[in-house]
Amino acid sequence: MKRLDVLICFLLVLVPSTFAQSHPVLDAMNAELARSLDQLKKQGVPPYFLSYEITETYSVNVSGSFGTLNRSGENRRRQLDIDLRVGDYTLDNTRPVRGAFPNFVDRFSMVEMPVDDNPDAIRAALWYHTDQKYKRGVEQLTAVKMNTQVKVEREDKSGDFSQQPGERYVEPLAPTEADRKAWEEKVRKYTAPFQRYGNIYDANASLSANTETRWYVSSEGSAIQTSQTYYRLFISSFTKAEDGMELPRYESFFSFTPDGLPDDATVLKAVDRMIADLKALKVAPLVDPYTGPAILSGRATGVFFHEVFGHRIEGHRQKNEEEGQTFKKMVNQKVLPEFVSVYADPTMRRWGGTDLVGSYPYDNQGVRARRVPVVENGVLKSFLMSRTPIEGFPASNAHGRKQAGFAPVARQSNLLVIAQKTMPRSDLKRLLIERVKQEGKPFGLLFDDIQGGLTMTGRTIPNAFNVLPVMVYRIYPGGREELVRGVDLIGTPLTVFSKIVAADDEVSVFNGVCGAESGGVPVSAGGPGILVAQIEVQKKQKSQERSPLLAPPFDDK
Amino acid sequence: MKRALVLIPLFLIAGPLVAQQDVVFKAMRDELSRSMKKLQLEHLEKPYFVAYKVVESDSKNAAASFGSLMASGQNRSRMLGVEVRVGDYALDNANFFSIGFGGTGVVRMFGGNLSLPLDDNYDEIRRQIWLATDGAYKKALEDLAKKRAALQNKNRTDLVPDFSSEKPTETTDVAPLVNIELVDAEGRVKQLSAIFRAISGVFTSQVRLEVSNVFTRYVNSDGTSFTRKAPWIALTATAATQATDGMPLADFVVAYGRAAADLPSLDQLTALVRAMGIRLAMLREAPVADRYNGPVLFENQAAAELFSQVFAPQILGTPRMITDNPQFERAFGSDEDNLLDKIGARVMPDFLKLVDSPIAASFQQIPLLGGYKMDEDGVRARETVVVENGILKTLLTGRGPMRGILQSSGNRRGTGVMPSNLLLISQKAMSTDALRAEFLRLVKQRGKEYGIVVRRIGNPGVRGGGQGMSFSFSSAGPSRQGSRVEPAIAAYQVFLDGREQLIRNATIAGLTVATFKEIVAVCDKPVVYTAPFSVRSANPFTFNPGGTTPVVSFVVPSLLFDDVTVQKPSGEIPKPPFSKHPSFEK
């Protein structure tokens, strides 16, 4: 018996790379890729690189609100992305034309593909769109060449595309395990406790299973098939304060397996906590703009690093001369305290008690995923690289990512903040209180739960970030904690990085979707709770809508 | 006697019982009466009119290309639309546009619509109606104040009310549900789209089937209510290619019905789609003709499309939108976009009559599919004579009055005012042969070598071969300079000896609504043609919840014009593909 177990394990490991049958979609793509290259070779300006990526998403979605069903459905679609390059690795049609209106035509397309595995239909669509793409490519190359002549020399003289060995990898197709009838009951059950409250204006639960299968072939000889199912439960609700401020509260759960989602009892407990928090938030006092020491919980640390740091180490931003390029010249310099290291690791599947949504075996440019040490012991080591080279970093490290339909750029995967020197949360709070007393501040802040964040990395606007907290507490010198509302955490990157003082041992992770120029991609960010010597908060954007005039119908008797 | 006494009360309550069992209707009615009674912000005005519409849609769709499934799915949705008016019939908040940020109350609505629970849960449906009404009422108050302010600095040239007063009606319009299994729909589109695997000249193609049952409940504070259960099937096949010189070419087949049996049989559809594909492939080799000025005969589908694109949009009466932003004023300048000023004037030759008839179910046994018992405001459908003896009598309207037209004609459809079934009737028609002879006589009289017959014109609502991006935008109707007619798909040079030469990429230029006065003659065998109609909406930001693409059925005879310009397209032409279609590479 034992041997059998071992054998099965072994097989599971081996199947992906060596033994699996090639998929008919992959075969059709390969055949048309070869034919296209052959045909276009006869043209005056032949392509030097061509890749096809077909992304299939099969999604099952069920959502409910206030104990009733709102939506239940499933959907399958396939989308095509073509990367066709004319010119050569040093200069090609994809180089941004400086001074031109942003090129949306070549950065975004929406090409639906047949969802059957019919090779003729797939090849017909590939043929038509390759031809269109080729014509655009030749036109664009002319514009790029002229642009390099009439504009000043670029600061970063690296080429436009990095070479990459062909990869062959075939993963088995992932199953989608979703019982819609059972899920419909679940979303009703999860949102029923909100029914009693006329002043909770939205209470929505959605359960989804999303199977994403990608087929990638390239003129470098790559043939890759990856397949992964994402299971999510997301519960959102909001109420309003007397002054009109919307007060949201979210719970989200993510797993690679259906069994990894929490059971009903756990969810219902979370729902009770949401309701209690909403009630408390409704009467919580407002905080005025403030600077002083603060603790960020692990999830807040994750989002904070994602916004402040993650977006600024995306490789292509170091090359675009409209970007702020905060860290461009800081490689091998200290950017963080010595006890902090940061990794971008798409190969990590689980951390901080949850599966990591930002994991993948290959990026969207056929590059095999690997762990990238971004900061080691406080020293900046690397950027996140797509196949767009930058000075000093000629190769990709598998962070060329995108949503289907967009052209890939360097994006984050799983951003892991690791502290070598930690302490219990209670000690971190003690440290905070000491600082509050030393500085004569009335209180310190604790950012516990957060909903997300945003940042601007350009030069034309202030280079700042904004983390949007949901649950914020004032910690008084005496140790009392008080829930407050109405503030966002803001700042500028370099200043705030120099103020990180200590970390705790409670690692937690934020699984989310990050939106940028290559669309929405799933990312994770996590770390320990951290103490920042000085942060700044600004007033939250506030709704001007007053609460409903009439009482809820069921209370209006 | 006793038995009869028992029976009568039972019979009497049977009606109300049906309505009571419908919890959605009950929630709508109860919240409506509460809103009318109690909804008031401090000392401000109460609503004088409230209407709720719940549109429940259960739809399936399947699309295929080259014999392979592109997409398929089913969808159920229940959307609430809320209309709240403050002020009075003479001047209220409606028909006013102001760009604003932030919300309409605490719930997020899209174009005045809100998604409702699919479950028949009375309390929860009422909760959503309550929140949506609250938002709509607050917005109405603000809009009315802004509208009054915007009007303070203007003298209104047309002193007509903002809203027409209509007789309350209670109507039921229920047709049997249409049901096609999704696998059958998938099978059918796969089979039909596979036809193109044997037609080498077509580059892209798609066949799409949509089956839906839309259940609408409507109630308003006038006392009007209706229930509509509308089944709908739509089949659309599109194909596109490029001529040998690169000029784009496209064609389509559409078929609609309210029951599965209304659609042509699979064999008939196969023949229609194949004929379209072969026609398109042949068109690639056809010559392009030089500019032509002279007699043009629009036959069958081409006559109906021409009428739909050029004349029909002009008989729709939508009041001019008022806005507080001068930048938008031009966009809403709709007065000049219809024939309001031509009422009483001649717009067609005196032998023509135009009737909009939502109550006509068929014409010579062919079903007309644009009809209904009541329009989207609950106004009872009736026949409207739009043109009589060539003289324009009135326009088609909704509840937005216009100068001289104070009542709704019952033409509120989708998001705006739309025709239902348009019948162009002639008191002086010729046989098809006589019309052709007349046409050739005119050609000869003009000293022309040939005349042009147009047999097919594209439809703006059916485009492309199913590939690439396509966006459709609703606009305030055709531009003032004259309507753009979609390119002719099938046009022929007809020589004096009767010989016909197919030409491609023919564009009809400068044909406007005024040209219809110059119709020389029409035939006595009108075509019955049902096609999508681009609805004219006063506010381009409105949204039609869960509704299907509105169609209009036309009954239009072939039309002979004395002088029309037909030319070839100008500008750059895309190159043909660099390589052959992989399935036809030999």
Image (spheres, coloured by chain):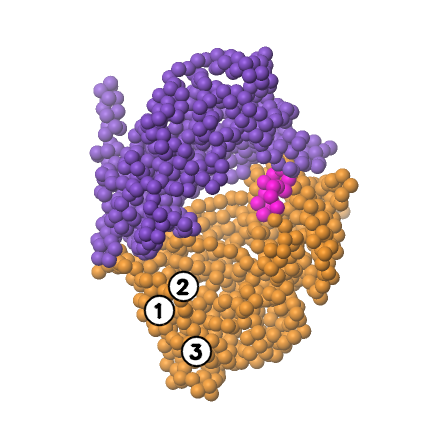
- The answer to whether the residues at label 2 and label 1 have Cβ atoms under 8 Å apart is yes
Three-letter amino acid code at disc 1?
Leu
- The answer to whether the residues at label 1 and label 3 have Cβ atoms under 8 Å apart is no
Three-letter amino acid code at disc 3?
Tyr
Q: Which residue is mark 1?
A: B283
Q: Of marks 2 and 1, which one's residue comes earlier in the chain?
A: 2
- Which of labels 3 and 2 is toward the front? 3
Secondary structure state at the residue bearing disc 3 = strand
Q: Which residues are magenta?
A: B100-113
Viewer-closest of B382 and B308: B308
Residue A298 seen = no
In the shown orientation, is residue B146 left or right of residue B441? right
Against A233, residue A499 (above or below) is above
Magenta stretch: residue B13 in it?
no
Check if mark 1 and mark 3 are on a common chain: yes
What is the distance, in whole Å, between disc 3 and disc 2 at their CAs?
23 Å
**Marking on residue B292:** 3
Against B241, residue A365 (above or below) is above
What is the distance, in whole Å, between disc 2 and disc 1 at their CAs?
10 Å
Check if mark 3 and mark 2 are on a common chain: yes
Q: Position of residue B541 (x, y in %)?
A: 57, 52
Secondary structure state at the residue bearing disc 1 = helix
> What color is chain B drawn in?
orange
